[in-house]
Amino acid sequence: MDNPRPEKVAIVEELVGRFGRTAAVFVSEYRGLKVSELEALRGGLRDVGAEHKIFKNTLVHIACERAGLLVLDPMLSGPTALTFVEGDVAAAAKRLRDFSRQNPLFVVKGGLLDGSVLSAKDVAALADLPPREVLLAQMAGLMAGQMASFAGVLQALPRNLAYGLVALRDQREAA
């Protein structure tokens, strides 16, 4: 049995560590793309807290085995690249989708999100989500609306009690 080279061991360890600390990992195939095209993709992904790297499938397989993520194995065929997302997952999925629309040779195969396997369709659905800021604003609007309704209910209680007491007093005075 031969000993693996230290460079390969370091790459496997790096991959295992990244699998453990990133929010999502997307798997893609880049067959036929130019280095300049891939550099443009990397730059766009860096802006949203993601990193696109190419690794040998064998090393990724070993790292997946060590990390307990063999579910990625079916996606590891052909020239494969991994996109590690530590920032906005939906924004990274959008960048990958937009890049694949401009470069049909680039194919997003799927990935992992918080330990759950994603198909290519799942990644496309993530890309259709509104940006994080928009979702947060929508949620804040819903919460503000609920709080305003609750405040209205709280204001109505003493007011209705006062109306009831006045009606009771008027009824007793009339009797």
Image: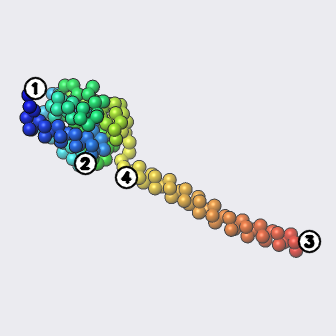
Coordinates of residue 78 in the picture (x, y in percent): 19, 25
Does residue 52 appear left or right of residue 125 in this picture? left
Image quarter where the C terminus lies is: bottom right
Image quarter where the N terminus lies is: top left
Name which residue lies at 41% across and 49% down.
135
Relative to 114, residue 74 above or below: above
> How far apart are the two marked residues, 1 and 3, measured between alpha carbons?
106 Å
Instruction: Kindly state the secondary structure of the residue where label 3 is placed.
Output: loop
Density class for disc 4 (Cα within 10 Å; few <14, some 14-19, many ≥20) is few
Density class for disc 3 (Cα within 10 Å; few <14, some 14-19, many ≥20) is few
Instruction: Kindly state the secondary structure of the residue where label 4 is placed.
Output: helix
Q: Amino acid at mark 3?
A: Ala
> How far apart are the two marked residues, 2 and 3, measured between alpha carbons?
76 Å
Q: Earlier in the sequence, mark 4 or mark 2?
A: 2
Residue that mark 1 sits on: 1
Q: Amino acid at mark 1?
A: Met
Residue 84 visible within the image: no
Q: Earlier in the sequence, mark 1 or mark 3?
A: 1
Instruction: Kindly state the secondary structure of the residue where label 1 is placed.
Output: loop
Residue that mark 4 sits on: 133
Q: Earlier in the sequence, mark 1 or mark 2?
A: 1
The numbered disc on residue 175 is: 3
Residue that mark 2 sits on: 49
Name which residue lies at 36% across and 49% down.
132
> How far apart are the two marked residues, 4 and 2, measured between alpha carbons?
15 Å
Residue most toward the front?
1
Q: Amino acid at mark 4?
A: Glu
